[in-house]
Image (cartoon, rainbow, N blue to C red):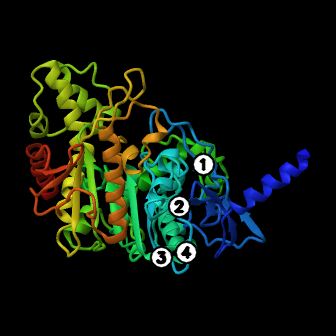
Amino acid sequence: MKKWCWMLLWLSCAWTQAARLITEGGALEGRREDGVDVYRGIPYALPPLGTWRWRAPQPLLTWPGVRDAGKFAPACMQQGVSMPGETPPVVSEDCLYLNIWAPPQRAGQRLPVIVWIHGGGYTNGSASMPLYHGDRLARKGVLVVTIAYRLGALGFLAHPALSAESPHHSSGNYGLMDQIAALQWVQRNIVAFGGDPQRVTVAGQSAGAMSISALLVSPRAEGLFQRAIAQSGGIFEPLQIAPGYLLANAERDGATYMKSLGAGDLEAMRGLPAERFTGAAGISHPVIEPDVLPMSPYDAYALGRYQDVPLLLGSNSEEARSLIDVSNVRADQFEAGITASVGTLPPALLAAYPHATDTQAREGRLALERDLRFGWDMWAWARLAQTKRSQVYYYSFEQRPPFPADSIHANWGASHFAELWYMFDHLGQAPWPWRAADRELATTMADYWVNFAATGNPNGRGVPHWPAFRGATGQVQRLAIPIRSQPVPALEQLQVFDTVYSEIRSK
């Protein structure tokens, strides 16, 4: 057979493997890959360019013909990577796109949906990162949507001139607005992919989980999802120790930042190249302002002003090992090192972590960073979320992956990021010596996450029972082999944090 005949035959087979459907923007053609329909680079809003920079995402325009959804779109503007060892993504200011992994459709199919919000400290991260691909979860019966959102100063700049032009007299939170716009798109379009708009779970890790704590209390996000999963991240510390979150302070910081770039007015600000806005220290977090986030998540939860949806949350037992190097920590410099890293902490917090010897100091520094950045937030969130009817399911991830000694992950243990390989069931993406216990945990965690997306409860056939969390000292699910329920880890130290934070709030 001639070469061109073979080519025609290959094209014919490839065409039969394409998946085509209609959305509000027009026709899409994705790909059928290993039994899963994949749609990449779907726009959910207009590109936030020119006059649309630092404005709410604008409604999408329709496109003619069939749009090819076979390639990922660029990630939003950023420097560096969200996870050590990750390949830096291609970036662009034109970045408001999402990706979908879906089981092949059957007539009348309405499957649960997981919308994934990536982490990266609001400064980097990508919806196309291979670890976040939803193929393995889709084979278990859910649709997985990964969304991009504006980062850094392009996503979170507050500025007096931006507030003045806003009908809400506020600025910042453009990245949160993007997340809300993507969830609105899902509500309007997910049926076309076989998804159920009444069974949408918003899920995320690190800054993605922090975003979820904001979305749960944002009036603009109400009704856009029915369950929430938060992994190692929340915004619950007292605003007294994070004053930059308040609009007036964020506007001041934003004005100082723009002055440093030589932009004196909005026209000049919107005329600067997007590359100038990456790596902006301090201009990369949500803002408490009248429109999107009228009050802090802690205050909103304390007042009962949050969405009453089932919640699955938790953190990792060795979070800080992938984030800080403690090899040079010494007992005689313990307090000075912490002050240099995070500022002056109350003596009661320092005393809660023994540091009389160098070994104690290293372990104490890791434990303090774990609880300061993640552990207390998740425990506080789990307690606050019990004031309404929906159940809370709380976990502690404690499995230590078999990271090779010569890899960048060598000393991570059960660190920040480590649970992602398991919950996405993507052990196969890393050529490490995975054990039977790792494969068992990955299967179980993926089942827990899918069960929760389907019913609001992680329990189901073939998985160890996971009790709902009750009170402040209830049972937490230990995610390690063997899986079991246990008391809240590091409870005494978390209670010290609680006492200190309560005193700060009362002043």
* Amino acid type of the residue that numbered disc 1 sits on in the rendered structure: Ala
Which element is circle 4 on?
Answer: loop
Task: Tell me the residue that label 3 is attached to.
Answer: 110
Picture residue at 20% right of the left edge, 74% below the top: 388
Q: Residue furthest bottom?
A: 108
Task: Tell me the residue that label 1 is attached to.
Answer: 263
In this orientation, does residue 454 appear?
Answer: yes
| Residue 470 appears left or right of 229 | left
* Amino acid type of the residue that numbered disc 4 sits on in the rendered structure: Arg
Chain-order first, disc 3 or disc 2: 3
* Amino acid type of the residue that numbered disc 3 sits on in the rendered structure: Arg
Which element is circle 2 on?
Answer: helix
The C terminus is located in which quarter?
A: bottom left
Nearer the observer: mark 3 or 2; the answer is: 3
- 453 lies above or below 499: below
Chain-order first, disc 3 or disc 1: 3
Q: Residues within 10 Å of mark 4 (few under 14, many from 20)?
A: few
* Amino acid type of the residue that numbered disc 2 sits on in the rendered structure: Ala
Task: Tell me the residue that label 4 is attached to.
Answer: 106
Q: Nearer the viewer, residue 125 or 479?
A: 479
Nearer the observer: mark 1 or 4; the answer is: 4
Query: Which quarter of the figure has residue 97?
Result: bottom right
Q: Position of residue 52 (x, y in %)?
A: 63, 63
Task: Tell me the residue that label 2 is attached to.
Answer: 161
